[in-house]
Amino acid sequence: MFQTFAVPNPRQEILVPLATDRVETRLPDLKPALTDAQARAEAARCLFCHDAPCVTACPTGIDIPMFIRQIHAHNPVGAARTIFEANSLGHSCARVCPVEVLCVGECVYNDKGEPPIMIGRLQRHATDHVLHAGIQLFEAGAPTGRPVACVGGGPASIACAHELVRLGHRAVVLEKSTWPGGLNTDGVAPYKMQAEESLAEVEWLSEIGIEWRLGVEVGRDPSWADLEREFDAVFLGVGLGADARLGIPGEELAGVWG
């Protein structure tokens, strides 16, 4: 009735491979990954402000001076842990977050008329290191016997499920689509992040024990009553609704997407 997506073994491939001839694969990164030398050089520019305005501007409160200091000290794993402790979706956020109006926009170098620290690219450097090397930083907590359903397979439910598993609860994500990840997988401009990277993040986060049920429509199968019987709690992370239509000729044609 549904396709189960689970990651019992590290780096297990997704069940349905992505098409390799997608147009998005031809687009280069707008902000390419830094080399180790480039990352350390950029980290060395940071002033490690005590009352860092970049941290205040970060919606998830990542200790930015700390993870940059860790990169400078040749400790990308420690930097990644600092990031993920504050933000489970720190890997995708490094690519898609509008840093220019948040942390980077508040960097004190702006007031000096000098280029601000490339915080997003340094964050990507650290998270790339652990994800691409298959280094797992977290584990499931002692089992509590409390199952929780997370409805919707996008960033909100994924972050919730990851935190629940770390606390020892059983987290099951139910997603109507055949792909996990929500807008991170199919809604982000590909010059920022492509689908493969979103799915790699989902796999890495799921390794600690997040369970997936793909291709299910909550309310039909299973019903809400079914969820109440099976789970002790339900988290709703259903995401955005349908796109707005422009009301112009041709928008109903095949291949036209809002």
Image (cartoon, helix red, strand yellow):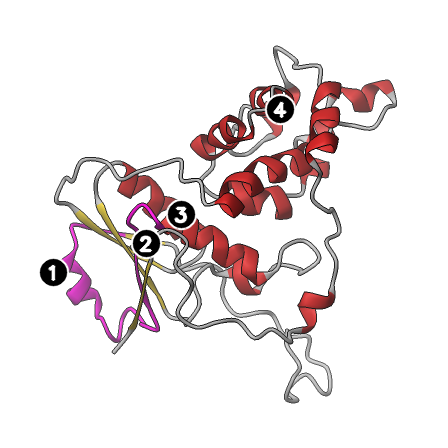
Q: What is the spatial separation of the Cα atoms under label 1 and label 2, in whole angstroms?
A: 29 Å
Mark in front: 1 vs 2 = 2
Query: Is 144 on the left-hand or right-hand side of 18?
Result: left
Mark 1 near mark 2, Cβ–Cβ under 8 Å?
A: no
Of the residues under marks 2 and 4, which one precedes in the sequence?
2
Task: Tell me, for residue 68, which label it has, or none.
Answer: 4
Residue shown at 62% from the left, 37% from the top: 125
Residue shown at 44% from the left, 67% from the top: 179
Residue shown at 21% from the left, 65% from the top: 224
Of the residues under marks 1 and 4, which one precedes in the sequence?
4
Task: Tell me, for residue 205, which label it has, or none.
Answer: 3
Residue shown at 53% from the left, 47% from the top: 132
Outermost top residue: 50
Query: Is 101 on the left-hand or right-hand side of 74?
Result: right
Amino acid on which the number 1 mark rests in the picture: Arg
Task: Tell me, for residue 117, which label it has, or none.
Answer: none
Which residue position holds label 2? 9
Residue 39: x and y in percent read 70, 31
Image quarter of the C terminus: bottom right
Outermost right residue: 113
Which residue position holds label 1? 229
User: Magenta segment: does it hold 210?
Assistant: yes
Amino acid on which the number 2 mark rests in the picture: Asn
Mark 3 near mark 2, Cβ–Cβ under 8 Å?
A: no
User: Magenta segment: does it hold 122?
Assistant: no
Magenta range is: 207-234
Figure quadrant of residue 59: top right
Query: Between residues 253 and 25, which one lies in front from this camera angle?
Result: 25
Q: What is the spatial separation of the Cα atoms under label 3 and label 2, in whole angstroms?
A: 12 Å
